[in-house]
Amino acid sequence: MRRTTVAGLLAPLAVFALVLALVPATPAFAGATIVIVNDNAAGVGFNDPTVVAPVGGNPGTTLGQQRLNAFQFAADIWGATLDSNVQISILASFVPLACNATGATLGSAGTIFIWDNIPVNGTFPGSEFPNTWYSQALASKRFGADVLPAPVCTTTGLPCTSNAQCGAGICTDADIRARFNVNLGNPGCLTGVPWYLGFDNNHGPNTIDLVTVLLHEFGHGLGFQQFASLTTGAQPLNQTDVYGRRLLDTTSSKLWPQMTNAERVASAINSRRVVWDHGQVNAEVPSILAFGVPNMRVNSPGSIAGNFAVGGATFGPALTPGGVSGNLVQALDPAIPVTSPTTFDACSPLTNAAAVAGNIALVDRGTCGFIVKAANVQAAGATGMVVADNVAGAPPPDLGGVDPTIIIPAVRITLADGNLIKPLLGAGVNVTLLIDMTVRAGADGMGRAQLNAPNPVQTGSSISHWDPITFPNQLMEPAINGDLTHQVTGVDLTLALMRDIGWFPDADVEGIADADDNCPFNANADQADNDADNIGDVCDSDDDNDGVDDTADNCPIDANADQADNDADNLGDICDADDDNDSIEDAADNCPFASNADQLDSDGDSFGNACDADDDADGVLDDDDNCPLVGNFDQADFDRDGLGDACDALTGPPQDMNQCKNGGWARFNEPRTFPNQGLCVCYVMTANGLKCPTQK
Amino acid sequence: MTGRNSGGVGPRVGLTGIMAAATILAASVLGLAWAQGNKDRDKPRGQGQGTQTTQPAPKAPDATATGAHAVTRTVGSATISVDPVTGRLQPPTPEEAAKLTAALYKMVSRETENLVVIQNEDGSRMASLDDAFQEVAMATRDRKGNIRVHCVNTAAQAEKLLSGAEDKGPIYNIKVDRKAAKKGGHNAPAPAPAETE
């Protein structure tokens, strides 16, 4: 847990603001807790007491409170999206930043520390790759604990307790530092264009939505960033970062870590040929990016056939999927000093109108406006216009200008492409200007998302953003567009990229990715799964898979669909240690299913009499045995009284007739009827053996 | 993580200041930039520390000033120029502007050679990016009132956006008709006025 002390507060308002900042919002799902650590002193920035009216769902009633609320609102959006069991802290402040009347630094954010070789920690996986940098918040997520639990100086890395110990640096354990311009909109600082502090994205034409900018910059701080220098190609300590591991240059087919410094510099300006090549982004491109990329398709000659990137035009008709086809014909016009110095710029009426008519005119950029060129080639009968750039660079920018009389489509190609095509015009170059509906805007032909790699480097940082051609507009494009929603998922690839760098979904924040977790929403680090059905026991309603819900199952973790319960004690037999409830555990019970506390076992065969079908082990089942407890396999029953001789105390030959008459030694001849029918035959033991007395 | 930072510091590559030379150059770019003051040095960041405010919180200033010599006051982590009569913020001095610009350039620095690195006993390493390697959002407004918002990470980009040079980025304060744009296959009229020649 990070610091939560409030020592050193200097004003009651600051106390309030800081407490507000440190109270983590409850995310909609497990997510992550992101706290805004208020780095402003009393009275300024987040603590500015200026009274304001609530705006756009932001309930704050002071300027400082609204700023803080907006920060927390943006943090909560990310917090509800990413999963971590470690609190993420953003050291934040509103301070003066460089600006002037027409340009301003809005704010900055980034990770303060980066980490490598994060070890495995229980169920937490640590680094996915060795010798690879991770932003601190991500490092902690993958470590399952705060990798930096106490403040250190940013200038020395040594433990500290105050900024005074840190020279030009600061003493902190925060993950991300964010500073935003406190003066925005004031005179001399993008005058009249202040922050919009509402939550509803309803910024007007002259305000800048703070939440959107925060979402973007927080995204960088959370890991949407690579750390190699784009001017030297050098990487921190000569090792890549996890973001770089996903960057593929489709020209060289090399990933960024495989490149030399010089190759990285070259790749950073290899427009439209640096792509993100990994699982989640690749999977989500089809559902997020729209089809339709303006293209010039060269149909012939075969040597250059294929798609050429183009910039569209703000005038003329939109390109269509079917496109406009024709031969490229270089427009010729008089070389007029100043106004039309070359014969290829179409800045004056064409001299080869007959050749151009019905075809697509190729003109050079320069001297006059694009709409002038378009008007001239249109007047010559061209069905379209291709402007070849006159300066190196890629991708080709759009053609600007307004002229409602232009009715032919126009595009721009790069200088390099123009120079490739021109020598072949004599043999015929047939092209189609179209919207290629087979390719998604912002992805290459293989469906891989493209990263911003303009040549030359333009405003908007390269590589650490999506290509601006991406459509719909994405949160992490180099230009922050006014139509962005406050979403980082669903309509945006940003979250997918976060997944790919290691922010694996882990709803129960136990360190096991949801995809590998047998209970994604219930922490169960042991992954216990009694019935091996890939549903962990803590979230399995039928742990033994016997079809009986655990809540009704008399043996929840032992399959017993029959719910047999011999002793009716609500513990099923298969999980009942004493199935007959005779207080003798089944393992020691000679009749586990028949209560016999005495454990009587007449025949010593280890089966208690209570459950032994042949108690005397004489081979005659008890039910048929005339002496169930005395072995008498012959079942001899001299007196035929149903008790075998072996167990009949009154057996043996009668000694006299009375005894014969009165005792149980009578025998009824068959068939007999009992009790008073039939013939009594009595046997008497004589010297000659058994004889019937009547026969004596 | 056990053993982290224990026993002091592991292998460390020294510390260097960054972009000092850029300070002077930058001052000319930011004529009206406002001042960034000294950082508060009392406590670790995040504990609500800071230099105590000595003035009421600044109200939204207007362009009017009394002409009196501005005085500087430390407000939280910033030093600002204040009109002694009205109490309103004043444009920065060249020195203040230079500091702001230097701070901006340090934010976007990608100097990789002299990072402070701590080796931990468990094999992990921590590198301090200090104040650099930040991504910086910037905005411009042209004469027509079009606002453009960029995210930059080089000094050249930052300098260009503050120089008043033409900004060809997409216009922020024009709502794009997504439906129309999609119907047009991403070829709807570009929201940004592109180069016209």
Image (cartoon, coloured by chain):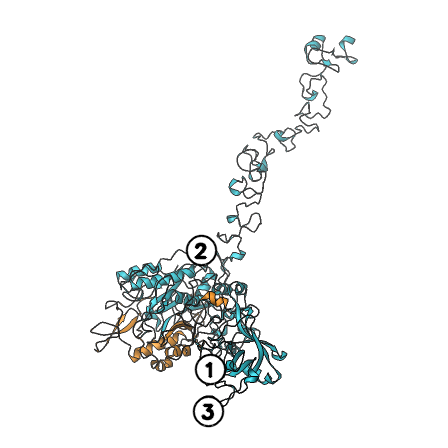
Chain colours: A cyan, B orange
Q: Name the residue tied to disc 3.
A: A337
Q: Position of residue B105 (x, y in %)?
A: 38, 76
Chain identity of mark 2: A
User: Rounded to the nearest whole Å, what is the CA distance between mark 1 and mark 2?
Assistant: 59 Å
Q: Which mark is residue A30?
A: 2
- Taking depth in this image into account, of B32 and A620 the one nearest to the observer is B32
- Taking depth in this image into account, of A469 and A188 the one nearest to the observer is A469
Q: Is residue A696 above or below residue B20?
A: above
Question: Which type of secondary structure does the marked residue at label 1 adopt?
Answer: helix
- Taking depth in this image into account, of A174 and A104 the one nearest to the observer is A104
- Taking depth in this image into account, of B150 and A640 the one nearest to the observer is B150
CB atoms at circles 3 and 1 under 8 Å apart? no
Q: Quadrant of the C terminus of chain A?
A: top right
Chain identity of mark 1: A
Chain identity of mark 3: A
Mark 1 or mark 2, whichever is nearer to me: 1
Q: Earlier in the sequence, mark 3 or mark 1?
A: 3
Q: Quadrant of residue A305?
A: bottom right
Same chain shared by disc 3 and disc 1:
yes
Is residue A560 found left or right of B190 in the rendered image?
Answer: right
User: Rounded to the nearest whole Å, what is the CA distance between mark 3 and mark 1?
Assistant: 17 Å
Q: Is residue A19 above or below residue A674?
A: below
Q: Amino acid at mark 1?
A: Val
Q: Earlier in the sequence, mark 2 or mark 3?
A: 2
Q: Name the residue tied to disc 1.
A: A372
